[in-house]
Amino acid sequence: MNSLDDIQVTVLKGVGAALAATLAKLGIVSLQDLLFHLPHRYEDRTRITPMGSLGVGDVGVVEGEVVKTDLVMGRRRSLQVSLRDQSGFVVMRFFHFNAAQKNQLTEGQRVRCYGEVRPGRAGYEFYHPEYQLNPPAMPDQSQATLTPVYPLTEGIQQPRVRSLCQQALAYLKRYPIRDWLPAGMLADYQLPGISEAVALVHAPPADAPVHSLMAGQHPAQQRLVMEELLAHQLSLLRVRAQIQERKALPLLPSGDLTGRFLDSLHFRLTGAQQQVLSEIRQDLSQPLPMLRLVQGDVGSGKTVVAALAALQAINSGAQVAMMAPTEILAEQHFNNFSQWLEPLGIKLAWLSGKVKGKARITVIGQIADGEAAMVIGTHALFQEDVAFDRLGLVIVDEQHRFGVHQRLALKQKGAADELAPHQLIMTATPIPRTLAMSAYADLDTSVIDELPPGRKPIETVVLPDNRREDIIERVQQACQAGRQAYWVCTLIEESEALQCQAAEVTAEHLRERLPELKVGLVHGRLKGPEKVRIMQAFKDGALDLLVATTVIEVGVDVPNASLIIIENPERLGLAQLHQLRGRVGRGEEASFCVLMYHPPLSQNGRARLQALRESQDGFFIAEKDLEIRGPGEVLGTRQTGMMQFRLADFERDKGWIEAVRELAPALMGDHQRVDALIRRWLGDRIRYGDV
C-alpha cells in the first residue's frame, strides 16, 4: 500500500458498507478521492455575534439559552425553539425533526447555533441551523480556523464529511499525494506542492489569510484550480487526439455544384462567411478529420456556410449527415436544404425518432446504399441500426445541447470503418472567448461576425407588466398592418406542465381581447407533428399571433414577424433572451422586442435587461451573461455534465485559461501523467476509445 489511491474509504472510522455506497455516489472510493472532494466555500465561525445586533441575511454564530420550545401546527408542522442571550432573542425553526431533538432542546439548555438570519412569524429565525448542545468554550481568536463547506449528496451531512476529511488528512502525512505537475511549472507560477495545497484547503491554519481563502484566491486554492483547469483541457485534447487517430476522406473543393448553388441565391456571401468558408474548405481537403466550431450570431448566415460545406463533400462522392437537437429545428433544416439542394439533383433523406415502421426501413436503406447523399434529423441519426455508405461530413447544430461523448461516438460512423467523418459544429449562442478556449479545446473555432446587409437592428423596449393593455394594443396594430407577432410565456418553475398551462391561459386571454386575430399556441407538450403544423401555419401567414413557451428559442424563421413580446424576461439568461429576440428582424420591416417584466426588478435583473436594451451584439451579451450566471448556465452544460468544476470558478479564475491552454499540449506526450490528472479531476466521466 504505497498511495492514497490504493486505500479505500472503509479504513476510516464510521464508514461501513452503507456510507461507502453513499460516498461512491459522489465519486469517492479511495482516500485520495475523498481529499479531492474539496470545500467549495468556507464559513467564519470564529466569533459569537450578539443576537441583538443581527440583521436579515446575516450569517453567523449565536449562543444562548433555550427559553421555550413549541410544536407549531401550521400549513407545515415545525419545531420552534426560542433562544435568548443578554442582547435579544432568535428562533431556531426545524421543519424536519425527530422526537430526540424535541426532547433535547428543553428550557434552560445552552445552545450554540450557526445559520442565516431570515424574517419569520416569531421575529428573526434560523431555518435548520447546525447547532451544539452545551458547547465547549470558543477557541482563542489566535487559534480559531475557518470551517470548510463541502458539496453533499443525499444521505450525508456536513459534519460527517468534515470528520471524514480530517481523518483522511492524518493519512496524508504518511502517504503524500503524487505531484503530476512538473517542478519547473510549479516554480514558474510560485505554486505550492499538491499535498501541502490539499492539506491547507481542508484545514486552513489559524493564521491563514481569511479574506483570500473566502475569495478563493489563496495560493493553495489557486494551485488546485490550475491543476483542475489543466485536467479539463487535457481531457478535451485527448478527445481530439482520439478522433484524429483515424484518417478522414480528403474532400476536395471541385465540381460545379458550388457555383450553381451560389448563382441560385438571391444574395452575396458576406466577407465573414467567405473567410469561414475558406477555413472549412482547407480543413475538408485534409486526410485528418476536421473538428471545427462555427459561431455566428442570430441571422449571420451559418446555414448557408453549412450548405456549401455539404456540397464540397457531396461533390467528392461522400455522404453528409446533419443533426439538430429538436424536431422543429431539424425539420426546418430539412426544408431549407431541400429547397437549395434538390434543384441540383441531390437526394435528401429525413430521419427522427418519429419515423417508424416501413418509412424508417426505407430511409435506413437509402442511407446504407448511398442513395441519400444528405441525411438530416435528430440524434436518431446515430443509433446503432443506422449505417452509412460513405459518410464524409457530419454537421451538428447547437452543439452545446450535446456532449463530448457524442463527438467521440460520431467517429464510429465514418466510411469504411477505419475512416472518421469530418465534423462541423455550429452554434448561434455566441460563446465568450475564454469559455470557448476551455469548453471547446478539442475544436478549431471560426466566427461569422458580420450580419448580411439590409438587416435592421431590433428596437428593444423594457416595460413593467402593468402596461399589459398597452402592449396588447401594440400587437393589434402590428397585426392589422399585415405583420405577425410572437408572445413568449416563461415561468421560473422547471415544470413543463406549468409552463404549458401559463401559455394556454395567455392564449385564451389574447383570443378574447383580440377576436379579430388568428391566435396559435405552441408548447413543449404538443406532439411533434402538431407543433410542426402550427409553426408552418404561422410561417405561411395563416396565423397572426403565435403564443409560445421558449420552444421557439432556436431556428424559427418567419420574415413577416416584426414584434415579439417576452413575459418575465428577468427569469431567463441573457443569451436565451438574445436568441428569442432574434426570431424577429428577419424581414424588411423595422422590428421590435418588448421585455415585459414583473416589478420589482432585482439589481441583477435590471443589469441584464439594460445590457439587452443597449446591445445587439451576441458576443457582448454572452460576456455579460457569463459574468452574471457562470459557465454551466451559459453553455447549457447542466445537461451535458461538462464544465462542472469542483473548485475552479470560471469568472474568478479566467486568468489561468490562456496559460493552461499553452501548457497542456506540451504534456500530451506523457500518457501516464495525462491519465493520472484526468482520473484525479474528472474520474470516469469521459470514456475514451470505443464509445
Image: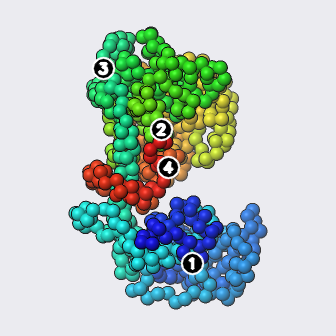
Residue type at the position of mark 1? Lys
Cα separation between marks 3 and 1: 67 Å
The correct choice, above or below, for 27 with respect to 161 in the image is above
Cα separation between marks 1 and 4: 32 Å
Q: For mark 4, give the secondary structure.
A: loop
Going from the N terminus, do you reach mark 3 or mark 2 first? 3
Q: For mark 2, give the secondary structure.
A: helix
Going from the N terminus, do you reach mark 1 or mark 2 first? 1
The correct choice, above or below, for 522 with respect to 44 in the image is above
- Relative horizontal placement of residue 470, taking residue 414 as reference (left or right): right
Q: For mark 3, give the secondary structure.
A: loop
Which residue is nearer to you in this view: 255 or 4?
Answer: 4
Going from the N terminus, do you reach mark 4 or mark 3 first? 3
Q: Are marks 4 and 2 in contact (CB under 8 Å)?
A: no
Which residue is nearer to you in this view: 380 or 81?
Answer: 380
Cα separation between marks 4 and 3: 37 Å
Disc on res. 409: 2
Residue drawn at (63%, 81%), measured in percent from left and top? 83
Residue type at the position of mark 3? Pro
Q: Are marks 3 and 1 in contact (CB under 8 Å)?
A: no
Give the mark toward the camera: 4 or 3: 3
Q: Determine which residue is flagged by label 3.
A: 253
Q: Determine which residue is flagged by label 4.
A: 641
**Label 4: few (<14), some (14–19) or many (≥20) C-alpha neighbours in 10 Å:** some
Which residue is nearer to you in this view: 640 or 508?
Answer: 640
